[in-house]
Image (cartoon, coloured by chain):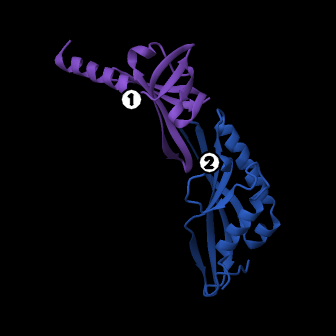
């Protein structure tokens, strides 16, 4: 593993250890990650862009259309259902773009 | 001072559409702020640029253009749903006697469908409408047609 890949792996591991604020239940498997739902106005309508970011290896095989339920205490969310609409691989992390189920 | 014939037509269209379609009371005029969940399905009526043709010394024909924005959400079939809403809107506008008294030749001259996806699918259809009125050049508040 080259120096950059090693550094990237260490950073990803640190992010995964320090920043998670949510748990997603996907196919009966609980995965810890970072949930966010940034405000976004689309076509003149108030909306949000919910995402869930985790270490890529924790989400092996997740595809568009998969369903999950998010628990995020800091946002007051309990088992809120979402559908995966996009899966983005980002340097060892995976970002799921979500839609309300 | 009386409102222009353009404003009168847009005001009448707004009144006619309020609570007469699936949008219920979610009918807005020239709204710039984002719509919230409880305001969809919704309609937004916007004034568009108009043009005027001189008819001799004493009359002008105004082509009055306005847009009706139709919003739907949480729909996998948003094109079908927004089309249904547009057909309700069109039927109401076409049948409104007060609107017909303000101008002539109401027609839908085009539509522009758009969609985007975030935490839900938003569908929007902008329908362009045109009416024609004759006015005296010195008085834009009354039609003489």
Q: How much space separates mark 1 and mark 2, taking CA atoms?
A: 41 Å
- Between disc 1 and disc 2, the foreground one is 1
Question: Which of the image's four quarters has the N terminus of chain A?
Answer: top left
Question: Which of the image's four quarters has the C terminus of chain A?
Answer: top right
Q: Are marks 1 and 2 in contact (CB under 8 Å)?
A: no
Tags 1 and 2 on a common chain: no
Assign a secondary structure to mark 2. Answer: strand
A15 up-or-down from B37: above or below: above
Can residue A44 be seen in the rendering of this structure?
yes
Coordinates of residue B4 in the picture (x, y in percent): 65, 78
The tag on residue A95 is: none
B124 up-or-down from B51: above or below: above
B142 up-or-down from A88: above or below: below
Say which residue appears at 69% left-offset and 38% top-offset: B80
Q: Which residue is mark 2?
A: B125
Tell me the chain of label 1. Answer: A
Direction from residue A74 to residue A92 in the image, left or right: left
Q: Is B61 in front, or is B71?
A: B71
Q: Residue furthest left?
A: A3
B120 up-or-down from A40: above or below: above
Assign a secondary structure to mark 1. Answer: loop
Q: Residues within 10 Å of mark 1 (few under 14, many from 20)?
A: few
Q: Is B89 in front, or is B43?
A: B43
């Amino acid at each position: 593993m080259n120096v950059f890949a090693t550094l990237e792996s260490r950073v990803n591991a640190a992010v995964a250890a320090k920043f998670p604020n949510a748990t997603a239940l996907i196919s009966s498997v609980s995965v810890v990650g970072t949930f966010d739902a940034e405000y976004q106005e689309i076509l003149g309508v108030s909306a949000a862009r919910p995402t869930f970011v985790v270490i890529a290896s924790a989400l092996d095989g997740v595809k568009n259309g998969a369903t999950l339920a998010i628990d995020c205490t800091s946002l007051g969310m309990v088992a809120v259902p979402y559908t995966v609409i996009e899966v983005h691989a980002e340097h060892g992390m995976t970002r799921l773009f979500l839609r309300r189920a | 001072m009386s409102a222009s014939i353009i404003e009168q037509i847009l005001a009448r269209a707004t009144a006619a559409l309020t609570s007469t379609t699936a949008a219920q009371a979610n009918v807005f005029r020239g709204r710039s702020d984002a719509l919230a969940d409880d305001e969809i399905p919704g309609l937004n009526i916007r004034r568009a640029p108009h043009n005027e043709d001189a008819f001799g010394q004493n009359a002008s024909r105004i082509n009055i253009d306005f847009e009706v924005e139709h919003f739907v959400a949480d729909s996998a079939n948003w094109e079908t749903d927004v089309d249904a809403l547009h057909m309700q809107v069109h039927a109401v506008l076409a049948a409104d006697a007060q609107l017909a008294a303000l101008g002539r030749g109401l027609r839908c001259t085009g539509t522009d469908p758009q969609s985007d996806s975030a935490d839900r699918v938003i569908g929007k259809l902008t329908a362009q409408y045109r009416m024609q009125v004759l006015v005296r050049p010195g008085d834009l508040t009354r039609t003489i047609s």
